Image (tube, rainbow, N blue to C red):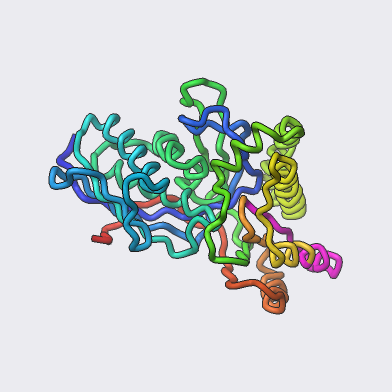
Amino acid sequence: MQKPIKASAIANANIALVKYWGKRDKKLILPNNSSVSVTLKDLHAHTTVDFSKNYDRDIFILNRREFRVGTEEYEYTELFLSLIRKIAKSKLRAKVVSNNNFPTAAGLASSAAGFAALAAATNEALGLDLNKKKLSMLARRGSGSATRSIYSGFVKWRKGKKEDGTDSYAKQIADAKYWPDFRIIVCITTKEEKKIKSRAGMAQTVATCPVYNGWLRASKDDLKSIERAIAKKDFTLLGKTAERNCLKMHAIMMTTTPPIFYFNKPTIDVMQSVLEWRKEGIECYFSIDASPQVKIICLEENIKKVKEKCKHLKGIKKIIITKPGEGVRIIKKHLF
C-alpha cells in the first residue's frame, strides 16, 4: 500500500429508468431486483478525502456543514470509512469534505453521487487499485444507487443471487456518447429535504405492501424492455417502460402501511402535463424517483418545446436540461 495521500473525485448523479426498491440484505445493500439507469451530465458531487494520523476521529463536512457523531449522515459515512480501513488494513482516520452542485437529500440521487465519489477518492488515497467492477461493489456499500454512478451513460445494476454480494454490481450498457440526442429535463419542485429517506421507505414497503411481489415480477419484464429499447435506440419503448415502471414503484409506496406519498402538487401538475403534451404530438415521458422531483425524458428535437411549456407550469423552482454523462473520475482539485 502506498503512503496515504489526499485525493479528490467527482461522480455524477443518475436516474433509474427501471428502478430498484427494496433490499434482500440491508447491511450489504443487496437489492431485490435489478435496475437500469442513465448517468446525468450536469449533476455531480465533488469529494475530497484525507487519511492522516493527525485525526483522532473521522470528520465529515457536506455542503459546508459539519455533521457530528450520532447524525445519520455521519454514521453512514463512518461506516463506509470503517469498511475502507478494513480493506486497506489501515487504522488511519479521515477527513471527508463533499459538495453537491444540486439539492441534497431531495430525491436527485445526491447519495449515489456522493458515495461513488467517496469510493473513488478513498480507493485513490489508499492505493487500493480497485477496478471499476470492484469499485462499483464498494460504492454500493454506501448507497445502492451509487453502484451505477461509477459508470457513464446507460448502466445496469445486477441484483445478484449470492449471499455475500459478490455478484451484485453495476455494468455499463452503453457510454455517454451512445445516444447523442437523448435528453433529460429535471424539474425541481422543491429544494427541501424529503421527510422519508429511501432506506426507511424501502424497508416499510417490503414489510407492509401487499402487492410488493407483483412489483418484483413486473420489474423483470420492464428490465427486458428497457435493455431492448437501449440496444435498438427505441425511444418510444424506453419512455413508455420508464414511465410505467415509475408509476408502479410509487403505487407500492402508496399501498404500504402507513402510505408513503412523495408527490407534491407541482409533481402531479408536471405528470398530467406530460400526458397532455404527448396527445399534442410532443413525445416526452416522465420518471420520478423517491421524491417530488420530476425528470422528463425526450429527444433533442423536442427539448425547446418541452422547456417552454415547463416554464408556464406553477411550482417548478428550477429547470435543468441535461444528457447522459461521465462516470466517476479522479481530479486534482481538492476542497481543503
Image position, residue 25 (x, y; %): 52, 28
Segment colored magenta = 273-289
- Tell me if residue 116 can be seen: no
- Locate residue 48 relative to residue 170 in the image: left or right: left
Residue 264 placement: quadrant: bottom right
Q: Is residue 280 magenta?
A: yes
Numbered marks: total: 0
* Residue 274 x, y percent position in the rendering: 77, 64
Left or right? Give the position of 38 relative to 267: left
Q: Nearer the viewer, residue 183 or 179?
A: 183
317 is higher (above) or lower (below) than 121: below
Foreground of the two, 326 or 84: 84
Residue at image point 56% right, 65% down:
322
Residue 265 visible? The answer is yes
Q: Measured from the top left, where is residue 21 in percent x and y?
A: 62, 39
Picture quadrant of residue 312: bottom right
Residue 305: horizontal and vertical position, in percent? Answer: 72, 75
Quadrant of the frame with the N terminus: top left
Which quarter shows the C terminus?
A: bottom left
Residue, far right: 279
Q: Residue at x 32, y 50 (%)?
A: 68
Q: Residue shown at 68%/64% (left/top)? A: 299
Question: Does the magenta run of residues contain 245?
Answer: no
